[in-house]
Amino acid sequence: MKKDIILQLSVRSIRLNFLRSVLAAIGIVIGVVAIASMGMMGANMTMSVTEQLSAMANVLVVKADTGGGGGFFGGGPGESSGTISKKTSSSSVSTKDYITKSEFDDLLRAAGKYGTVYPLYQTSDKIQVGDNQGRAAIYGMREDDMASVLIVDQGELPKSAGSVVVGPTLADRQGLTLGSRITIGDATKNESVQKFRVVGILKQKGMSMDLNSDNGIIMPEKSYVGIVGGMEQYDQVNVIVSDIKNINTTKSAITDQLNRKKNVVSIQDSSRMLESITSTVGTLTTFVMAIAGISLLVAAISIFNVMMMSVTERIREIGILRSIGTQKSEIRRMFLYEAIILGLVGAGIGAIMSVILGWLVVLAMVGTTDYFFTYQSLIYVPVSMTIGIAICIFSGVYPAWRAANLDPIEALRAE
Amino acid sequence: MQDIPVIELNDVSKIYPLLSGDVVALDHLSIRIDRGEFVAIMGPSGSGKSTLLNQIGGLDVPTSGVLKITGKNIRHMSDIELTDLRLNAIGYIFQKFNLIPLLTAYENVEYPYILKHRDNDTTGRVSRLLADVGIDRKMAEHKPAELSGGQQQRVAVARALVNDPDILLCDEPTGNLDTKTGGQIMDMLTDLNRQGRTVIIVTHDPLVGERAERIIRIKDGKVEGS
Ligand SMILES: Nc1ncnc2c1ncn2[C@@H]1O[C@H](COP(=O)(O)OP(=O)(O)OP(=O)(O)O)[C@@H](O)[C@H]1O
Ligand SMILES: [Mg+2]
């Protein structure tokens, strides 16, 4: 068996200065754990957010092009937060903020073959349930569309003019159950006030671009027009594309159909939102990892310090080794081994701990560990280990070089 | 018969530049030592004996002059070659023993063997040498710090011999030993000299000097009486 005497010397030196070596290794452990768990947190967050968002990625929201381009999240019911202003069909075409029936028909022609196309009226208004007052988003939908888009949890879809379905969040907040009555409209502002009966409560849908039904009241087109007005002046048209691969095809089909001469409609898809959220999470992760990186820097300094102390303390020993025929390269190797051993031990313990700690951090920060044992997440363990070991070796290079280049005679005279 | 001298110093000086002024440790020394000689270097403390031995051992380079070891000018040798020379051709017994504190006595002796052969000693040579210098098995497991000065001295002698060097440089090899053990070490060195090795020994002890074939006396870095 070949015995690497140089390695033996490194191991013994570490054992002899056990406490010092342990402290240096702990630095690496902390650095590795910090980088790995932060990286894993970021990866898990990205994956979880992306998963949630891509559930809605198959939706295109078409609105009238008012020239402003339209914000992403502003398209919801909160936009017209004032009182209900009855829409007048006399408003000039160039400033209209709704989609006409004929435009909708064009849309249907262009996009119908790719999925479900449905128009939507939306506003928000004051509501009253018993003595409770509040605001809610109010949507109007055609009855056929309701059947194909909405999923009812309790009760049924509204069949008659006086009935509505409500989202589960709103129902919870306002204590609505099947048969509850809601008064819609603000009497103090001279609006027509109408009472509706809740006939159904929708299933939880989560965040979505097309229709935030969780927090809304949905009624048939006729009822909606009855209080808000504007028959067949749709606030938006949603296209639920059946195959997500066809998103762009659908988009260009709509553009070709309606925006040939001038921009009649604006089309929003979730890809930009998805991108911006993913990149925000990415930036956050990078930032947090940079902070974690600082802990590795501190670890590097402590390793460097330990190595330099090791060199200084062992000057005489180095002199002896050199004087009886140890090559410079072997002295270098001896100190690099020491750094590598510290790095390996530190990174190894760090890896184990970062899986445990990372799991806890992900559970606490992301809320789910569904994505923890995926490649994108666990890759941070070997990555941070490599960084940790590399930093150890890097901080060992100069001390090793110093040791190897000592003058043997000078070194022998050291006390 | 001795064509190339093992050691040849020609006008060699060693000057240590210090803040308080230069220290001339070796002052234009010229010495020639042939293969197989047994030479004692004697002189008062601080006369430059150890410095001279360091030059001969390839540990240090003279400030001026030419130093040839087995015909090769050390100034033209690379660090790697000089280190190899120290490992393979020269056995050095230091005045201060210079054992490796991390290793046991046995491992200290084995260390140069491993460096040379890249393998552990399976021939029993290390144990034999330790027995020859009077270090028993139990003592061989001790670290240098756990040994007496004389015991360390003996381990250092065994280590110098392990790679079977052609040249033996001994700086006060008996300085820490009682007369009996000192005599044993001298017997060993005399024996090695008879086998054809060149032995150069630095000593204060006139009795030790007497056993040498030739005595070089040094004073203030110069060879006396020549
Ligand atoms: N590295 C050095 N730096 C400065 N001066 C030195 C150095 N090494 C030796 N000297 C000086 O050189 C001179 C010779 O020293 P050296 O060690 O060779 O003496 P020595 O003959 O071996 O003495 P001793 O018998 O006491 O061992 C001394 O004056 C010493 O102070
Ligand atoms: Mg001396």
Image (cartoon, rainbow, N blue to C red):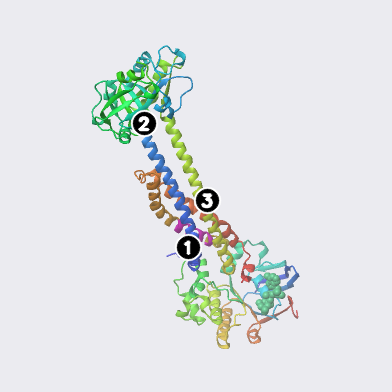
Gap between marks 1 and 3 measured at Cα: 20 Å
Q: Chain of mark 1?
A: A
Is disc 2 on the same chain as disc 3? Answer: yes
Quarter the N terminus of chain B occupies: bottom right
Q: Considering only vertical position in the picture, is A250 above or below A328? A: above
Please state if A336 lies on the left or on the right of A112 as rendered. Answer: right
Where disc 2 sits, the SS reads strand
- The answer to which of marks 3 and 2 sits earlier in the sequence is 2
Q: In this view of the protein, can residue B4 be seen by the observer?
A: no
Q: Considering only vertical position in the picture, is A145 above or below A366? A: above
Query: On the image, numbered disc 3 is attached to which residue?
Result: A294
Query: On the image, numbered disc 2 is attached to which residue?
Result: A134
Report x, y in % for residue B46.
Answer: 70, 77
Report x, y in % for residue A8.
Answer: 48, 66
Q: Alpha-carbon neighbours of circle 3 within 10 Å: few (<14), some, or many (≥20)?
A: some
Q: Chain of mark 2?
A: A
Where disc 3 sits, the SS reads helix
Q: Considering only vertical position in the picture, is A289 above or below A19? A: above
Q: Considering only vertical position in the picture, is B206 above or below A56? A: below
Q: Nearer the viewer, residue A247 or B171?
A: A247
Query: On the image, numbered disc 1 is attached to which residue?
Result: A22
| Residue type, numbered disc 1 | Val
Residue B170, quarter of picture? bottom right
Where disc 1 sits, the SS reads helix
The answer to whether mark 2 is within 8 Å of ligand 1 is no
